[in-house]
Amino acid sequence: MLELAVVLLRLAQYLGAMLLLGVPLFFAFRMPTSDAAVERWPRKTLLIAAAVTAVASLTALVLQTAVMAGSMAEALKPASLAYTAFDMEIGRAFVARAVVAALAGVLLLVLRPGRATWIDLTVLGLMVCASLAWTGHGAATEGAVGAVHLVADIIHAFAAAMWLGALAALGLFLTIPHGDPERDRLTHDALHGFSGMGTLAVGLLVVTGLVNTWFLVGPDRLGGLLTTPYGLLLSAKLAVFVGMLALAASNRFVLTPGFRLALDDDDLKPSAIRALRHSLVLETLLAVILLGLVAVMGTLAPPAAMMM
């Protein structure tokens, strides 16, 4: 039961971090323009993401303390919690993540939506995503190469948020009622603007993924991809990633151009929007599955950490 709770809390933090970085980043640099209807939903969505991330991080801190202290009763003692929160690297990462997520929530409540606000939130989202590296395998590598692994893990989280957070932004953006020609063109421009961000994100994910695999699996233990629980989950993650790439390619090279052609045809436009919505929903579902696999992998020993 404790293991399931740890996995669910990790998943909640991953989802929150992806949204807190990816959504404001997309609105700050890839949305060509905006209006009141577009601005309403990101604030609510990000407020929920900030609250979930903060609560999940603090709850994970308590569970981490319980694991080390041996019982929940011991973990709830102020001295035990304080030791984990301020004297351990993993505990400081949980606290920092919760504080920054809470700060993002405050900014969402007090600032008006706009490019400056989105940039401020992007900076906080970067901090939240970076903190994930200190509660994962990236912080476990020792020696001088440990810094390389940690940086690769941080960039990997950034790139994932660029893709998945923007994907969520597009998916929610397409839920806004369409029909107004100007807003439909804004939708197309947003989809087209995502293509550059998505390409960069995929490139970074591939490079940093290879670096992380080198540290966590190793060239001499590639057989562990099919013989260990961590390796099997990593293989499943790669399969899901390939599926997301196929959908992303379809969106970029087939559905988005098709929507562009349908902008001037009211008969074709509804079906083009439906096709985009269905594709983005499926891609988002695969993204959640992928993060779920990562959440489980974070609780397992990688092949490189196992004895020969």
Image (tube, grey):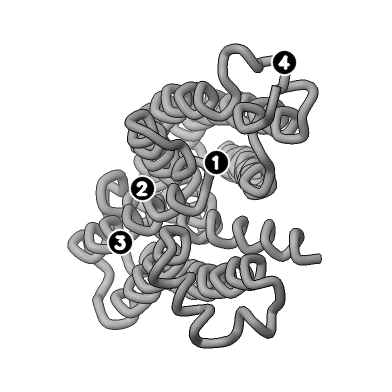
> Disc 3 on helix, strand or loop?
helix
Residue 194 in the image, given as x and y percentages of width and height: 39, 38
Q: Specify which label sits upstream in the sequence, 2 or 1.
A: 2
**Residue under numbered circle 2:** 186
Disc nearest the viewer among 4 and 2: 4
Disc number placed over residue 223 in the picture, else none: 4
Disc nearest the viewer among 2 and 1: 2
Residue 99 in the image, given as x and y percentages of width and height: 37, 73
Q: Amino acid at mark 3?
A: Leu
| Residue in front for this viewpoint, 4 or 182 | 4
Q: Specify which label sits upstream in the sequence, 4 or 3.
A: 3
**Residue under numbered circle 3:** 124
Crowding at dot 3, Cα within 10 Å, few <14 / some 14-19 / many 20+, comes out as: many
Disc nearest the viewer among 1 and 3: 3
Q: Specify which label sits upstream in the sequence, 3 or 2.
A: 3
How far is disc 4 from disc 1 in space, using C-alphas?
49 Å
Residue 295 in the image, given as x and y percentages of width and height: 64, 49
Report the residue that reaches farthest toward the left. Answer: 116
Say if mark 4 contacts mark 2, CB within 8 Å. no
The residue located at (57%, 87%) in the rendering is: 77
Say if mark 4 contacts mark 3, CB within 8 Å. no
How far is disc 2 from disc 1 in space, using C-alphas?
14 Å
Q: Amino acid at mark 2?
A: Leu
**Residue under numbered circle 1:** 269
How far is disc 4 from disc 3 in space, using C-alphas?
39 Å
Report the residue that reaches farthest toward the top. Answer: 220
Q: Is residue 273 left or right of residue 72?
A: left
